[in-house]
Amino acid sequence: MAIASISVSETPLVLYALRRADDALVLGHRLSEWCGHAPMLEEDMALANMGLDLLGQARELYGYAAKIEGSGNDEDKFAYLRDVRQYRNLLLLEQPNGDFARTMVRQFFYAAFADLDWRAMMQSGDATLAAIAAKSEKESAYHLRHSSEWLVRLGDGTEESHRRAQTAIDDLWAYTGEMFEVDDSERSLIANGIAIDPATLRPRWLKTVSDVVSEATLTLPKSNWMQQGGRSGRHSEHLGHLLSELQSMQRTFPGATW
Amino acid sequence: MTLHNDAELRQRAWDVASGVVDPEIPVLTIADLGVLRDVAVTDGHVEVAITPTYSGCPAMNMIALEIELALERAGFADPEVRTVLSPAWTTDWMSDDGRRKLREYGVAPPQPAGSRRALFGVQQVECPQCGSADTELLSEFGSTSCKALWRCRSCREPFDYFKCH
């Protein structure tokens, strides 16, 4: 017997917390798919470790969203009992792992953003968001360093690793614009000093990304056309497959616990 | 339990809670780690505040459970453990005694966090086995969230380094 999805009243603050929680959960889940499959033992541990950091961040944010929503939802219900269209994560993060270069490029694009976003959020007028950000910032800084070093190694490595890294950059570039988008819901929080306008982070993001990509002897695409939709629940086909695995236990055995 | 005032009970509860060790690094207590933040007693009811090291650290659930069990064994009924996030935990809170115990256990203690390291910043970590500074990073991530894997070029031993955070 399948169980029905929950409904969520997405006030601006709930939505803001859910968007970032979904980012962390979906990317964390993707990284967990590498467990036992990474090209070497050290990277197997690294990817699982980063996935764990992200899962921890997601739990804090879901817990906070549940508290401010105040209608009986909790971290597990948000993760296990929302449908694809209720997920608010960036399209970039649900993209399949592909090869190792693709996973690292996805990680790098996101970590370069998350690092700035968390650091800015430490100044949020919302004390809980500021506390979660202060915790997460240290983790994202580490993720950024790890993926930056890999990007340089891959791009400036063999012909094969260079080709794979460049292909990943070309394929994923169109998903990076969404990180800097805002809608009316988020604008109200920005005006109140709760949220940070991500557009203000874009020049610094681009500088970090350009510097590392050029050190890696790779190039950024010229195209400025950007894909969008994740923040409002319009996802690529990949998220449904991801959720069917992530949610299978709770959907099949509602309320099952360890 | 005989009647005590809350201040006495608090000291007793603190002593009990601070004896709980990290399940991953059993030579360190949660007090050594700086994970134990506060113990409050109100009308005999104990509330302990702990802070997570890393957001996803799975040892936190275990630590919370161990605190509850230890307090119950010491005669405190229904102790409560809650998690606080702010201020965020830093390796700078690790006691000197904790650093020494960590080194003796074979794990290089964290360097002072101080300023934010540059993206490709160079770290210098001393080998906990032979003390040599001629060491190299093998992997940014180790067997647990809080550790990285290093190797000593002098004695050739690999070792864990408690990441600075």
Image (cartoon, rainbow, N blue to C red):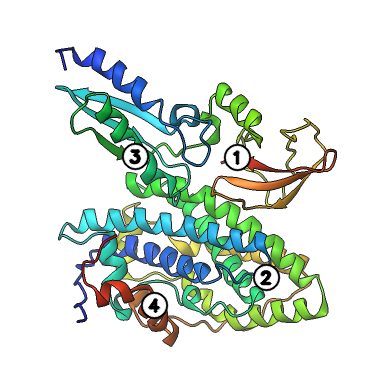
Whether marks 3 and 1 lie on the same chain: yes
Q: Earlier in the sequence, mark 3 or mark 1?
A: 3
State the quadrant of the N terminus of chain B: top left
Q: Position of residue B28 (x, y in %)?
A: 51, 31
Instruction: Indicate whether A106 appears above or below A96.
Output: above
**Image mark 2: chain:** A
Callout 3 amino acid: Ala
Left or right of B96 in this view: A28: left
Callout 2 amino acid: Pro
What residue do we see at 70% from left, 76% from top?
A: A165
Residue B164's tag is: 1
Residue furthest to the bottom in view is A237
Callout 4 amino acid: Glu
Residue B64's tag is: 3
Q: Secondary structure at mark 1?
A: loop
Which mark lies nearer to you, 3 or 1? 3
Q: Secondary structure at mark 4?
A: helix
Give the distance between the C-alpha atoms of the residues marked 3 and 1, in whole angstroms. 23 Å
Q: Nearer the viewer, residue B63 or A170?
A: B63
Whether marks 4 and 2 lie on the same chain: yes
Q: Secondary structure at mark 3?
A: helix
Q: Position of residue B55 (x, y in %)?
A: 44, 49
**Image mark 3: chain:** B
Residue A39's tag is: 2
